[in-house]
Amino acid sequence: MTWLRLLAVLCATAVVCSATSEAGGSASDPCREPGETAVHLVASDGARIYGVAVGRGSTGVVLVHQYLSDHCEFMYFARDLADRGLRALSIDLRDNGVSRGGAPGRFDRDIAAAVARLRADGARRVVLVGASMGATAVLVAASSITPRVDGVVSLSAPAHFDVLDALRAVKRSRVPVRFVVGTLDRQFAADASTLERAARARDKALLRLPGAAHGSSLLELPRGKAFVLRFVGR
């Protein structure tokens, strides 16, 4: 089974994958609550990226969804972060949700645009959190964004996804990194071990959680959520 087919199966069976209709756009975003800000970004190659910002504070967190999903996937966690005094921005990667344009698969550029927005809004410290496909993307983005981000969290990243090579990225990145994976999550568990061993960062750790929870579903497990929150908020 190819990575894309496997991720599609996991999305259908293990997580709730939502999508915002392109026609409706941000004005009818069912996942944005009163007081939350619709954000429109332009990536370096012209891709138009939509997201929702929640909270305030000097630490900003970019939240990046998994395959066949969108920003809605992380809104519950964005609100948890806001309640803890952090600033969160959950985005639709290009060709997902209502984000469109740019080079196919270059999700790292979307993340770079989100980091720039958080910094422009006052974040002095920025952490990236991604799920599955989005985790591969944040690992790649963390290796190239300047100034360097302050941390990156991978929830079930495949070592490679489409044009993105997370294994190569972690070998050259010194950004502090945390990996979280379910022990029964097939290839993803093996990839997490490979990525953690290969990571050049001195500050790195891998949390293996019992079961087959995948991607953002790992944050529904108390140990997984606590592990990520400690790292993001330190």
Image (tube, rainbow, N blue to C red):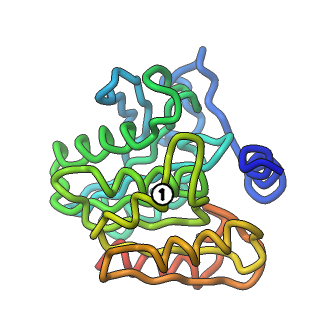
Residue 60, placed above or below residue 233 = above
Please state the horizontal and vertical placement of residue 138, each as a whole percent of the image: 43, 54
Q: Residue at x 47, y 50 (%)?
A: 137
Please state the horizontal and vertical placement of residue 143, each as a whole percent of the image: 32, 57
Residue furthest out toward the top: 23
Residue 59, placed above or below residue 209 = above
Secondary-structure class at tag 1: helix
Residue topped by disc 1: 166
Please state the horizontal and vertical placement of residue 39, each as a whole percent of the image: 36, 33
Horizontal arrangement in the rendering, residue 11 relative to residue 59 (left or right): right
Crowd tier of the residue under label 1, counting other residues whose Cα lies within 10 Å: few below 14, some 14–19, many 20 or above: many
Please name whichever residue, 63 or 183, is drawn nearer the observer in this view of the structure.
Answer: 183
Please state the horizontal and vertical placement of residue 209, each as a whole percent of the image: 66, 83
Which quadrant does the C terminus fall into? Answer: bottom left
Count the marks: how many? Answer: 1
Q: Residue at x 36, y 72 (%)?
A: 232
The answer to which quarter of the image holds residue 127 is bottom left
Residue 73, placed above or below residue 106 = below
Q: Residue at x 61, y 61 (%)?
A: 216
Please name whichever residue, 23 or 133, is drawn nearer the observer in this view of the structure.
Answer: 133
Please name whichever residue, 18 or 141, is drawn nearer the observer in this view of the structure.
Answer: 141
Horizontal arrangement in the rendering, residue 193 relative to residue 164 (left or right): right
Name the amino acid type tagged 1: Ala
Please name whichever residue, 37 or 197, is drawn nearer the observer in this view of the structure.
Answer: 197
Residue 67, placed above or below residue 176 = above
Q: Residue at x 43, y 37 (%)?
A: 51
